[in-house]
Amino acid sequence: MIKAGSLLYAVYVCLLISIFSATLLFIFTVSIEFSARQSIKERLIDRCESCLNFYLSDSNNFNDLKPEMIDIFGDGLVCEFIKTRWGAYTSLNVKAFFKSDTVQKIGLVGESNTENKLALYISDLGEELKLSGATSIKGNMQLPREGHKTVNILGNNQLNKPVVNGHISISEHTLPKLAFGRAIFLDGEKWISFSQVKNQSTIFRSFKKETLIINLENGERIEDINIKGNIIIKSNDTLYIERTAKIEDVIVNAPKVVINDGFHGNMQIFADKEIVLGERVKLDYPSSLVIYPDKDGFDKKITISTRSEVYGGVLIEGESFDEKENNKIRVDEGALIIGDLYCNGKLQLQGKVIGSVYAHKLEMETESGDYGNLLLNASIEADNLPNDFIRLPLFAQDKKLMYGMVKYLW
């Protein structure tokens, strides 16, 4: 006879084997499911990247802001494209999804134009371009019909050796018309006052959420705070940004914006009247300084002080001739702009631009006098702008262009 203890022992062994078998079966099932989901996830990541490249390849996709859904391979993995304006650029939100799984990428989009090597465009207003000192222009140019000549205003011929290297053609009476209009949309967003958050060390807003608008009262300054993400900083008074502030991916909007000496960050600034960059300010890519036409007044101005750097673009627009005559951009000696400089007004350029310069007129104020249509010790190098540099989408184009991702925001 089999003892009762042996039967109980056999039952325990069978139970343990059952539990072990069930555990193995569960692990195996979970592993298969996990592998399947991981495979779908990897396919979605690849599909999201493929959809992004596919969409960027056709500039017609950016003629409007209508959302689109595309199944580019017809296999049920659908991509959704949502476009919004974010400053001077377009924000592109790409989602690839299958059932409940979703992969998402958000980034800023601009023109990837490797053919435009234009260094300088001066409106043809019947006055020749005058070059002096160590001025250097490398790249194609569109100049007034009168052409250019070398002049000596320094009194030392040994220092008066301007260099011009590029094809020259005749410009039009006006600058090429800009393609984009005002780029700030404030309706339907979340507003808070700066006093509610200024005691925080960091303010971050994801681009997956609605835009956060921080409104400043008169006299408030941005200092000792880190502000990053899907945020618009707005003021109805002069806005001062101190070097102790850290700002990234943010839009700034005020009548006048002053960035004090030594600031380092990344932002798009849209002002009504004036933008002033102090000395040793560095605005990382993609940053932009923009002033639009103002029907209520003139005397709009952008100043980039010595040893300051802007990576992206600088733009001041004017509509009437009188407005253009009062618009001014001043780029001091030792300052650097990488990207496009568009001045539908009077430009005083003594710094360096790696990219393209468009100016209604040039001017130069020195101790010895004021000179029209003169470049003194300026440097413009269109040929040295990297081919993969994504520019501001300034102009309407007759031919198709590649678009590129300026920066991933998510």
Image (cartoon, rainbow, N blue to C red):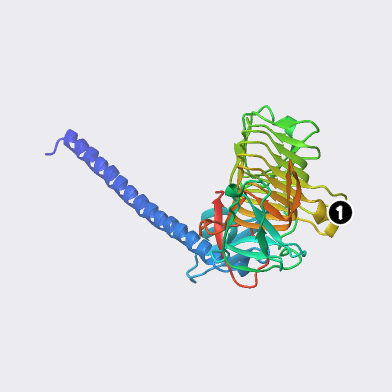
Tell me the kind of residue under disc 1.
Lys
Q: Where is residue 227 in the image (x, y as percent from the top left)?
A: 63, 37
Q: Is residue 394 visible?
A: no
Q: Which of 181 and 331 is in front in this view?
A: 331
Location of residue 293 (image quadrant): bottom right
Residue at 59% x, 54% y is 162
Q: Would residue 47 be found to the left or right of residue 292 on screen?
A: left
Location of residue 118 (image quadrant): bottom right
Q: Position of residue 8 (x, y in %)?
A: 22, 36
Q: In which quarter of the image is the N terminus?
A: top left
**In the image, is residue 41 above or below residue 304?**
below
Q: Where is residue 172 in the image (x, y as percent from the top left)?
A: 73, 68
**Mark 1, secondary structure of its residue:** loop
Q: Where is residue 371 in the image (x, y as percent from the top left)?
A: 75, 51
Q: Can residue 357 be seen in this view?
A: yes
Residue at 44% x, 60% y is 46
Tell me the residue that label 1 is attached to.
Answer: 295
Q: How crowded is mark 1: few (under 14 residues within 10 Å), some or many (20 or more)?
A: few
Q: Nearer the viewer, residue 215 or 176?
A: 176
Q: Which residue lies furthest to the left in this view?
A: 1
Total label count?
Answer: 1
Q: Nearer the viewer, residue 121 or 133?
A: 133
Residue at 64% x, 60% y is 120
**In the image, is residue 371 above or below residue 199?**
below
Residue at 48% x, 70% y is 73
Q: Residue furthest top?
A: 199
**In the image, is residue 308 above or below residue 353?**
above
Q: Would residue 253 be found to the left or right of residue 45 on screen?
A: right
